[in-house]
Image (spheres, rainbow, N blue to C red):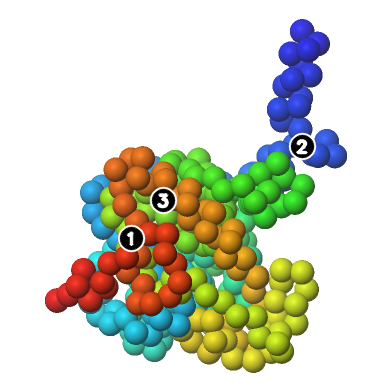
């Protein structure tokens, strides 16, 4: 009995006797929108969607071609909405610095569905069309046994896992919603850290206009962002690709240019031509 008890303790207790759940899910006690999430299970089964990255190449896309498609936008996509009127069907924010720097814009942004981790529940005042999910952040926590380990959740009602980029959250949501074809655009997979930037570990504070995204103000002067560490993004992408293909689904790269070669490339203008 003692040995069994010891094994159980080892299974649930992390480094420095901190339970893994507290490391990976510090906001586990906050309620998610579980019933709303359950109602979305396979709602778009067999359909296709587009996950929009915010790289400079997005400015080459005619977004009118996908205005009536199921599209995911993230973070500062509101700059594109202000610029040309395009508005994604789904809006997602994962990053705490993005939330802190843009909390007003995020609250003001309108979309048919808005997905946020319960971590930011206290910051979201406009809850129209808003769904909160549980997010496991062990990927980012050096004290977690899951540090830098890509994981995939097929059940959004229980948990979604971080994986170096908000795109991983989007891919898990898209899977849960039932999409069988996912097209990536604006995923340039190419970042430069300006010499003027203030670098503190993997946190970067911009001191000039942003050249890594479609809009100069995206991570413009004074905004904080993280070193994207593209090698780690690629590792997470590999898991996403595997999980989709095991289930007979497919992720395509419809980005115009860029350096992401893991996914089969398709021509944006051909796939979404009028």
Among the two numbered marks 1 and 3 on one chain, the one whose residue lies closer to the N terminus = 3
Considering every residue shown, the one lying at the far right of the view is: 16
Q: Seen in the image, is 196 located left or right of residue 15?
A: left
Q: Residues within 10 Å of mark 3 (few under 14, many from 20)?
A: some
Task: Please tell me the numbered disc located at residue 241.
Answer: 3
Q: Which residue is mark 1?
A: 264
The answer to which quarter of the image holds residue 64 is bottom left
Q: Secondary structure at mark 2?
A: loop
Give left or right: position of 87 versus 143.
left
Question: How far apart, in angstroms, are the residues tagged by discs 1 and 3?
Answer: 10 Å
Q: Residue 48 versus residue 192: which sits nearer the camera? A: 192
Taking the image as drawn, is residue 184 in sight?
A: yes
Between 204 and 111, the one nearer to me in the picture: 204
CA distance separating discs 3 and 2: 30 Å
Circle 2 is placed at which residue position? 14
Who comes first in sequence, dot 2 or dot 1? 2
The image's mark for residue 237 is none
Task: Give whichever of 87, 47 is nearer the camera.
Answer: 47
Answer above or below: position of 229 versus 247: below
- Residue drawn where x is 45% and y is 83% of the image: 56
Callout 1 touching callout 3 (CB < 8 Å): no
């Amino acid at each position: 009995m003692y040995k069994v008890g010891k094994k159980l303790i080892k299974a649930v207790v992390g480094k420095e006797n901190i339970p893994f759940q507290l490391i990976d899910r510090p906001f586990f006690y906050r309620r998610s929108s579980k019933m709303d999430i359950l109602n979305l299970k396979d709602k778009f089964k067999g359909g296709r969607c587009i996950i929009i990255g915010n790289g400079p190449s997005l400015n080459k896309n005619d977004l009118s071609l996908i205005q009536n498609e199921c599209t995911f936008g993230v973070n500062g996509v509101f700059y594109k909405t202000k610029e040309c009127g395009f508005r994604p069907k789904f809006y997602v924010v994962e990053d705490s610095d993005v939330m802190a720097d843009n909390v007003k814009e995020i609250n003001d942004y309108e979309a048919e569905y808005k997905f946020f981790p319960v971590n930011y529940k206290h910051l979201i005042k406009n809850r129209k069309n808003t769904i909160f999910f549980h997010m496991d952040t062990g990927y980012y926590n050096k004290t977690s046994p899951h540090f830098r380990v890509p994981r995939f959740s097929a059940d959004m009602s229980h948990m979604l896992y971080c994986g170096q980029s908000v795109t991983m959250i989007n891919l898990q949501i898209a899977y849960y919603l039932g999409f069988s074809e996912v097209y990536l655009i604006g995923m340039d997979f190419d970042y430069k850290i300006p010499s003027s930037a203030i670098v503190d570990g993997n946190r970067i504070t911009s001191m000039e206009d942003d050249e890594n995204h479609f809009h100069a103000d995206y991570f413009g002067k004074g905004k904080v962002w993280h070193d994207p560490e593209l090698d780690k993004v690629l590792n997470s992408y590999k898991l996403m690709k595997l999980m989709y293909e095991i289930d007979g689904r497919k992720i395509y790269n419809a980005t115009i240019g860029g350096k992401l070669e893991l996914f089969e490339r398709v021509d944006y203008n051909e796939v979404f031509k009028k």
